[in-house]
Image (cartoon, rainbow, N blue to C red):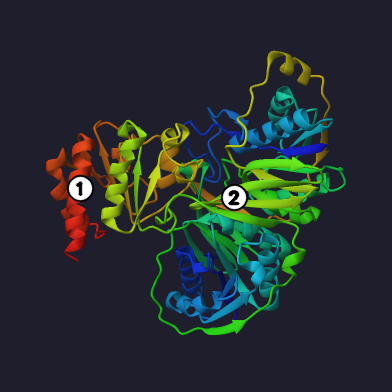
Amino acid sequence: MKIAVCIKRVPDMDLRFSIGAGGKALDPAGLKYDIADFDGYAVEVGLRLVEQQGPGEVTVISVGPAAVQETLRKALGMGADRAIQLAADELPFDGLAIARALAAELKDGGYDLVLFGRMATDSANQTVGPMTAHLMGVPCVTAVSRLDIVAGGGTAERQLEGASETVAFPLPAVVTIDEGVARPRLPSLKGIMAAKKKPLDVRPAQFGEARLTVQSIALPPDRPPGRIVGEGADAVPELVRLLQTEAKVL
Amino acid sequence: MANTFAFAESRGGDLRKVAFEAVSAARQAADATGGGEVHALLIGGPGIGDKAAALGRAGADVVVVVEHAGLARYSPEVFAATAAARLRAGSYRAAFFTASAEGRDLAPRVAAALDVSMASDLTGFAIEGDALVGQHPTHIGKIITTVRLTGTPAVATLRPGAVTVVEAARTPRVEQGAPAMDPAAARVVVTAIGAKGDAQLDLADAPVIVAGGRGLREAANFALVEALAAAFGNAAVGATRAVTDDGWRDPTTQIGQTGRIVSPDLYVAVGISGAVQHLAGMRTSKTIVAINKDKDAPIFKVADYGIVGDLFEIVPRLTDEVRKARAAQ
């Protein structure tokens, strides 16, 4: 089985963010980067499918500047076989533009399965996977929390609000991965050494026109300062009074 | 005059709250740009058309009903083809979907089919000239990104709960539509829907959410949270990741960056310290109440009202008081 996993390099979300000069991007000072959370799950899913159902090959693909090669090397260290950087100085915010670049690379690649994380933790658009599938002309299942692949097709489970649905689909397909499927492994020392010798091809990304752009970014407004109504159960009547008369939610 | 489109989400033959939110957003967009009609698309199994008139109260002028025995469950390819066909046939300035499990799956398919870009998970928006400008919480809610979307129609998903439904009291014209592809020809097929838990309100539909964390000490003590939710009468029960990871609660009730992102009118956090991961999922709630024994817990920084103390004393008392207040209404 030939599998591609599309991964994104994103800032570590645990750090404190500040707004960069120009007001359209994070201040890069002090940021650390890694594979986006859900994309790490997708890499793990791809590796396990090949391990369990081999023979096969996992190709990891990332769009962006030279720095994404570090992210690709990490995935190679986890066990992916080869990597492709679709080179661009900047990653557009527009999911359709990114999907165009990916679909052009993937379309004739002979992949049985193309995996994505369900969304990138930074831009959080959750659009690139299904848009890439549309441009490739293959079926797509999004945000799956369980995935079984059998001859020529698959079944997946998706979490809905208060329910879950089971979905069947044929291969080739695009599937985006929610957490819960497979916790990503850490690259072993041996894997990291081997990754240095694995092929990493660089090709230019072709986005077309981006029609979703970032106008500005800001830190979220602080919520108006709250107050401690009181201590212990004796504070309950006052809380209820405030919920009725001030917040008007009761 | 360009019209505005809204996708009216349903499940199990009933409209979801987010359907009214999408229609109301379309109404607000239409009114802000000098009028035009709001057209809602309602797809479902036989009988779904009975729900069409209800969308008038959120401001729909026209409801296009697509009833088909093969569409009682969500069918991503058929729904997308049908929405795209309708959007192609009319002159629509904007198309609103919801950032629900279904809407997040559907909207990018529709946008790609129309070869337009889309904006996701908006908490607010405005039409400015040839662009839709919206606010999108990114970076696990630690950044608010203002996005600018050009192209027609402007496709966007709205964060559940972010749009206040304005009563518009219209009687919509109901049009019968047809699926744009044969449902039997779909490649991706939903074969089953498994209900989770009992008939409690879902987190996306509930005006009130009562959520519990590690402070409850053990799974059985969630009974206190459930009793409080029951006293409100319109509440759903949520949980923190720590609690769902430990198997105390179903993972689909996890509120936070990696789980559900909610914006109810009232969010009651019981025994929740307020990790960044959790705050990312609930900080846009309209009113937040926190009950925690640690007065320095981060949850008190986002809470409008806090009570410091032993939740095992406070929550039963609150349950009593809420029940009394509800009974008096």
Tell me the residue that label 2 is attached to: A125
Q: As shown in the figure, which amino acid type bears the numbered disc 1? A: Leu
Q: Total marks drawn?
A: 2
Q: As shown in the figure, which amino acid type bears the numbered disc 2? A: Asn
Q: Residue at x 63, y 51 (%)?
A: A166
Please, which chain is the residue tagged with disc 2 on?
A: A
A31 lies above or below B98: above
Please, which chain is the residue tagged with disc 1 on?
A: B
Q: Quadrant of residue A65?
A: top right
**Left or right of residue B188, residue B104 in this image:** left
**Left or right of residue A2, residue B161 in this image:** left
Tell me if label 2 and label 1 are in contact, CB under 8 Å. no
| Distance (Cα) linking label 2 and label 1 | 39 Å
Badge 1: few (under 14), some or many (20 or more) residues near its Cα, within 10 Å? Answer: many
Tell me the residue that label 1 is attached to: B318
Is residue A21 visible to us here?
Answer: yes
A233 lies above or below B287: above
**Left or right of residue B232, residue B129 in this image:** right
Q: Residue at x 82, y 44 (%)?
A: A105
Q: Secondary structure at mark 1?
A: helix
Q: Residue at x 54, y 31 (%)?
A: A12
Q: Position of residue B329 (x, y in %)?
A: 19, 66
